[in-house]
Image (cartoon, coloured by chain):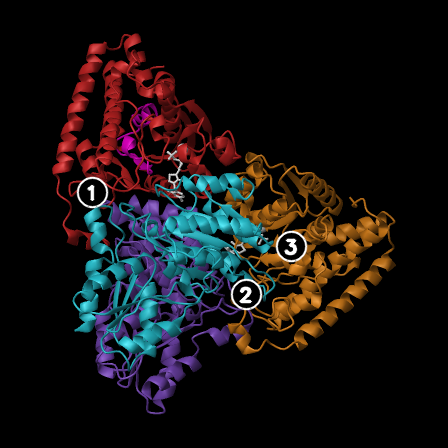
Chain colours: A red, B orange, C purple, D cyan
Amino acid sequence: MLPKLSREKLIDLCRRMLLIRHFEEKLILLHNEGRFSGHYHVYIGQEATGVPALSCLGPDDYLFTTHRNHGHLLARGAEPKRLLAEILGRRDGYNKGKGGTFHTNVSALGFLHTSAVVAGIIPLAGGTAYAAKAKKSGQITACLFGDGALEEGAAPESFNLASLWKLPVLYLCENNGKYGRGRAIGAAQSSTMAAYPLTDLPAAYKIPAEQVDGTDAGAVHAAISEAVEKIRRGEGPQFVETQTVRWPGSESNWPVVPVPTEFSLAWDLSAVPDAVKEWYRECDPILIFVRELVEGKVVTKEEIGKVEEKVREEIAQAAEFALASPYPELETALEGVFA
Amino acid sequence: MLPKLSREKLIDLCRRMLLIRHFEEKLILLHNEGRFSGHYHVYIGQEATGVPALSCLGPDDYLFTTHRNHGHLLARGAEPKRLLAEILGRRDGYNKGKGGTFHTNVSALGFLHTSAVVAGIIPLAGGTAYAAKAKKSGQITACLFGDGALEEGAAPESFNLASLWKLPVLYLCENNGKYGRGRAIGAAQSSTMAAYPLTDLPAAYKIPAEQVDGTDAGAVHAAISEAVEKIRRGEGPQFVETQTVRWPGSESNWPVVPVPTEFSLAWDLSAVPDAVKEWYRECDPILIFVRELVEGKVVTKEEIGKVEEKVREEIAQAAEFALASPYPELETALEGVFA
Amino acid sequence: MREIAYYEAKLEALREILAADERVHLITDTLTGFLGLSPHRARFREIAERYPERVISPPISELAFCGLGIGAAMAGLRPVVDVVTASFIFEAWPQVVNEAANAFYMSGGQTRAPVVFHVLHGLRGGGAAQHSHSPQAMLWNCPGLEIALPSSPRDVKGLLKTAVRTDNPTVFVDHGSLFEVRGPVPEGDEAIPFGVADIKRKGKDVTVIATSYMVQRSLSVADRLAQEGIDVEVVDPRTLVPLDFTTLIASVEKTRRVVIVDECRQSCGVAAELAARIAEAGFDKLKAPIRRVTTLDVPVPFSRPLEDFISPSEGRITEAIRTVLR
Amino acid sequence: MREIAYYEAKLEALREILAADERVHLITDTLTGFLGLSPHRARFREIAERYPERVISPPISELAFCGLGIGAAMAGLRPVVDVVTASFIFEAWPQVVNEAANAFYMSGGQTRAPVVFHVLHGLRGGGAAQHSHSPQAMLWNCPGLEIALPSSPRDVKGLLKTAVRTDNPTVFVDHGSLFEVRGPVPEGDEAIPFGVADIKRKGKDVTVIATSYMVQRSLSVADRLAQEGIDVEVVDPRTLVPLDFTTLIASVEKTRRVVIVDECRQSCGVAAELAARIAEAGFDKLKAPIRRVTTLDVPVPFSRPLEDFISPSEGRITEAIRTVLR
Ligand SMILES: Cc1ncc(C[n+]2csc(CCOP(=O)(O)OP(=O)(O)O)c2C)c(N)n1
Ligand SMILES: Cc1ncc(C[n+]2csc(CCOP(=O)(O)OP(=O)(O)O)c2C)c(N)n1
Ligand SMILES: [Mg+2]
Ligand SMILES: [Mg+2]
């Protein structure tokens, strides 16, 4: 289903989704080339959650994200080149190379702090929401985390505070564990979470909670915009779970690209290895969205092709920029511990 | 309602309840005399929960309790003299004076460890249950905690494990916050817990959960024996919430005895100060139980009088024993860190 | 200058802070606020009642409410979070040491988290193993947190004001046994800067570096030893992070004999760090090995005589001073 | 003696432990079990499959599953709980430092909690601020926990066996950078007792006390300096609790010059404690101030050159050795 938005807006959503995908695929290549070390996580397969969801927020709202943050930052308008520079540990990174993939944040966009501790952001999100409420600023806080975060006690503890104090916070739980086969390839909820459906947990704390197909941009947009409205009306915290099927490229601990994405895969999967064909046919949220755009006569294939071309260029330039950016001066390691 | 038990068993329950009450009232006196330092908590008002509940357990079962442990230990048969010696920090205490009121435990009775960290025991109880299940020993674990413990993330995290792994554990949540007026005098659930009724939280984790009047010995006995049976049948964790009204003597941070208990208060409240009369008339679980025993013609007032007399003597001897017990040798402070 | 009790100075600081800066919010059990089990705790109620929107009582959820304080600080408030007994900061450990401490650094300077965590540390008489911790050594091992330890009425007021004003997360490590101490406190706003040690007593024979309540204990030992002609200098770092090592080492170079008194457990405690630094920097100045007087390396026993036995008592401080003078 | 890789020795230990004692249960992500992100992690699967009832994979609930391990130990099992990255032990902090550590003592000896917590500590290359902790100093500040830090294939096998056998809660602090190290490992059951330091290299000019992966680094520095005629003794305490101070101080008395290399942050770190003890006990033996080489006191930066810069690198170790020899 397409979000109920103008043509321009829909094209913009499409552009952002493609930007995330091409960014991440490039990132995997760079990692394979040994351009950065450390564990990292990609957002591929969840683009139709992050992009429409974040489009429902206002420019002053706060956001918190996790180890799987790249897609969220890009969806909100972060510059690919500075994001990439950060992930490569370079001076021009948003965090001056100190954060890296786990911790990229852009405070100017409302991302104050990105925690790679599972559920680490859930208490914090209550705090920015508390502050906004105290200041009557009208800002809301979007707290973006995975299904695994509900297994940490930080989640229910924070739900309690948010519910009691009617804090203006949106909990967006991206459940990428649907059909997952164990922790390493996405937590299979049924084996790690007894509170199932997951919405039972926030509901116990009287937080309205809804489930939605995370590969359906229209459904995500509808659910999130409704939740955001309720929060702005002062109804307190809201919880939305979006369900996606884990991208097969993320099945091992280190991502691999089974096939480089191009929008034409939406109609022609001949280039896709058989083992992963089903995912690209049934579950790839970008291909679904592209088909909907074209079949709904919002845009032509040619138009999408142009969008994708520009995205490709942007990513190429970003990579050039990031690779050219120097490593930070060694002494900077000792600076910036305290304000 | 009286528990469905033999006359002897009922008299024994009555004796244990009176023992707890007289023990605690004596303890308050000793504290007022400056016989021990440190903060402490009494079980008064909850006797009709602990005594019948613990009577449903087998001799090999495990138990964990909290800062409010004295009643549980006595209900299970701990010797008042050694318990009191512990609370006074003496050599003959169960813990050699190292535990004190917060940590008294009697491993021979199944109390392996008593934590005064709110919710500290909830993860541990999953462990003994796990071990019993692994060893197929048939033992169950009773985890006894207050309503406030549900506010800690340790509780839901542990419920998840217990539910997923079908651990043989009984969660007995003694909610003494009914009509409480804020944290210091018992958490008023409505202001500190959004998951209300409290049973909503374990229920979200698919743990069968029930509420029962904690001043009604019969109701407690029925609920707990049913839960224990289910656990022994392999149905996994069960949760029971017992509701009591906080004893007015516990309304400040340091307990005071408004009137020394004697069983005859069950019919004659003239000695009770007006301000607290209502509690003794409506909420005192021991007086309720005594009335039921006599009105149900199980025992005569005289018989109860004799039971109480013996209890009084036992407490007097316990106090004598404890006060005569020497403080531990100073060097023992340095011993027993490691096994 | 007027003399008031420590707890009064502390309450005065809270009052003035709330009046001066509406970004300040207190997260605390409003019935015991910042005074724990002190008999004066009801005095806090008046403050709580004057600012019902800025003084809030949380559930027993240290992890969530400490994290909430951090997040609120990131969004521009100045939250002061009362964890009460220091042992309970362990419940919030992941938020304190792995979120608050890292936020400014790992964001590359984008995000400040000027939250204050308030704890009451140490032996308290019957607190037993689970309620008697002094977490400041563990916290000092975790870069990114400022750590303040007042020891006098003047310091508690002045340091609390600074704690709320600095742009960094601060752990304010207080001690219930200080509450009745009386001393001079200037009227009006006198913030004490972090990173400035205070010579609590001048002396020439031996330097005693003491923190928190141990400053008071060391001062009374010093008074007693003065009668024997032993002239003890008592130096109080007041903040561990930032640390005024200059003042410490200057005293050491003068007296050339050092005793460090601190209530953390010995191994990897605050005294270990101070001893290691001084032993290195003062290597050819020291005339005797540095002695540490700390809580002994055992869980805290409940029984009072045992608790006193493991504590950095006046007896043990006195003995250590005599040893380094030998 | 055969030479095998560290990770193989570790897996062998786990296999033998499970075979020998049915009280042993492993709580671990069965897909990464005890090897973290190592490329060899799949090798654990065979073990998990052989003991499906004794190797269980928990949810992301460190507090609950560490607590479950403690409780199971109290009831007679010998659980080994894999917390994976050491930073995550903070999630379980209240259970580890305030339940496990105190259980035996505060029960007056009634209750033993022979649980083993397994963590992978330290800088790992891009782990950044939240995944690079070395919590052993904080843990040492908390009496009641045994702490083992292997540094060689033989030690990892022998110490893991002892960890499972002792009646006390033990934190087994391992380091992913050791996994590829090869060395002699006896076949069969050779447990290494706790509290016995190991002189990893004999030397007469300077004592380097190093822990965990820093032992390997110090050994390669020692080899390099040997070519210049500098004869370095490398001493590995192997366990911090209990600590074999006798062996440490004997080496100090021989060389009279000490460098301590440890990956904790400096302030209140493991090196601080060792330095403070040695400075006191070896006061009139030392010819130069003790130098500590530790991770610098900042949150861990992501960027590799910065991470290397703050680490106790071979360069910094070499420099420290030269300084104490000057
Ligand atoms: C406290 C903590 N425990 C464990 C980890 C290791 N870890 C990193 S990602 C992850 C899985 C998280 O699952 P989920 O929250 O569903 O996010 P996803 O990766 O599926 O988006 C785990 C266990 C961690 N980062 N933090
Ligand atoms: C982690 C932790 N936080 C705070 C406290 C202080 N405290 C002691 S008892 C108590 C209230 C507990 O309420 P509840 O669990 O309902 O038990 P009750 O005392 O009512 O029996 C609190 C907050 C504590 N002991 N542990
Ligand atoms: Mg997930
Ligand atoms: Mg209660």
Could you say which disc has been placed on residue B339 in the image? 2
Label 1 sits on residue: A89
- Residues at discs 2 and 3 in contact (Cβ within 8 Å): no
Res. C31 in view:
no
Q: Quadrant of residue D206?
A: bottom left
Pointer 2 or 3: first along the chain: 3
State left or right for residue D10 relative to residue A297. Answer: right
Res. D195 in view:
yes
Tell me if the residue at label 1 has its CB under 8 Å from ligand 1.
no
Circle 2 SS class: loop
Q: Which residues are magenta?
A: A47-72
| Residue B39 horizontal/vertical position (percent) | 55, 64
Amino acid type, callout 1:
Gly
Q: Residues within 10 Å of mark 1 (few under 14, many from 20)?
A: many
Amino acid type, callout 3:
Trp
A61 is within the stretch colored magenta? yes
Circle 3 SS class: loop
Q: Residue furthest front?
A: D1
Q: Chain of mark 3?
A: B
Q: Is residue B71 above or below residue A105?
A: below
Q: Is residue D139 above or below residue D18?
A: below
Tell me if the residue at label 2 has its CB under 8 Å from ligand 2.
no
Q: Chain of mark 1?
A: A
Q: Nearer the viewer, mark 2 or mark 1?
A: 2
Q: Nearer the viewer, mark 3 or mark 1?
A: 1
Q: In the image shown, does D320 or A70 lie closer to the viewer?
A: D320
